Amino acid sequence: MRSLRIAGSAHAHMAVLALGAMGIACTASPAVAAPEEIQVYLDDATAPGKFGLDVHNNYALSGTRAADYPGERPANHVYRMTPEFYYGIAPGLELGAYVLTARAAEGGVHVDGAKMRLKYIAPHDEKQGAYWGVNLEVGRSDLAIAEQPWNYELKGIWGLRRGAWLVAANVDVDASLSAHGGPAELAVDFKVARDVGHDTQLGLETYSELGPLRAPGSIGDRSHRLYAVLDRDCGSFDLEVGIGRGLTSAADPWVLKAIVGLHF
């Protein structure tokens, strides 16, 4: 969401090594990721000492109606709002926290858990060329959205700017911190967008679950979604809106999303 660029530091390089070590150490098991944040990570990073807030919103116009496990809340007609607070702790290094909330189809507001994250973006050109980074999230989720309570996600971030075009990809490893949570799961998110002027980009995003990390299953058995998105820098805030279509039977058929970003 954010367009602020970053410079490197020795502290940030140490952080990425620590994140990698944590990811290797956490060979534990998978969790079903809740769709509280539908976003392809780019090279955004808050300047040291600065705060920001992104409010993630999504609504399943037409979603799954049957639970995948006892206690799960089916997605159909569920509205999720997830405030994400973040703070720049060093150049390229950002600490964040999420509060997961939802309004169920039958009414009633629920707090579904909370997560912390640490993100690193390597030094790179602000306008053109490639960038990379890594993001680690650890949190506790309610049974309504995750079969195991304590979970983590390790996300690799990559992107390239050429002229008016942006291409970005995230590789996600999702797992449970429980000893009996099952194998780690692999997912890939992708974005291509073009600057159309007036601080606006139009693009497409895909979100694809590939199954267990060591033995991905049939693509048709997993959730694959395609979103048409609009990103706009509105000065004091930025906005992303999109509509998504499920491409397989495991995905919610139609989902609306919007992300509003404020920076202090």
Image (tube, grey):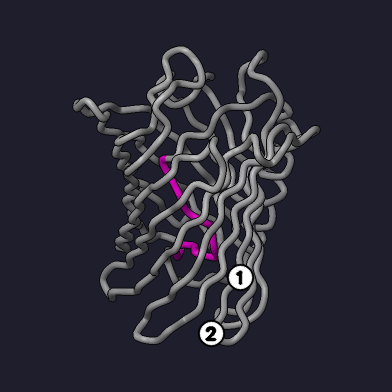
Circle 2 residue? 164
Q: Secondary structure at mark 1?
A: strand
Q: Secondary structure at mark 2?
A: loop
Q: Is residue 44 magenta?
A: yes
Circle 1 residue? 167
- The answer to whether residue 15 of the structure is visible from this angle is no
> In the image, what residue occupies the spot 29% across and 39% down?
79
User: Mark 1 and 2 residues: CB-CB less than 8 Å, in contact?
Assistant: no
Q: Position of residue 221 (x, y in %)?
A: 64, 34
> In the image, what residue occupies the spot 28% across and 67% down?
237
User: Relative to 21, is 128 above or below?
Assistant: below
Cα distance, mark 1 to mark 2? 10 Å
Which mark is on residue 101?
none
Quadrant position of residue 122: bottom right
Horizontal side of 186 relative to 102 (left or right) equals: right
Q: Residues within 10 Å of mark 2 (few under 14, many from 20)?
A: few
Amino acid, disc 1:
Val
> In the image, what residue occupies the spot 62% across and 35% down?
174
> In the image, what residue occupies the spot 66% across and 50% down?
171
- The part of the chain drawn in magenta is 36-47
Quadrant position of residue 235: bottom left
Quadrant position of residue 231: bottom left
Give the dominant element type of the magenta stretch: helix, strand or loop.
loop
Amino acid, disc 2:
Ala
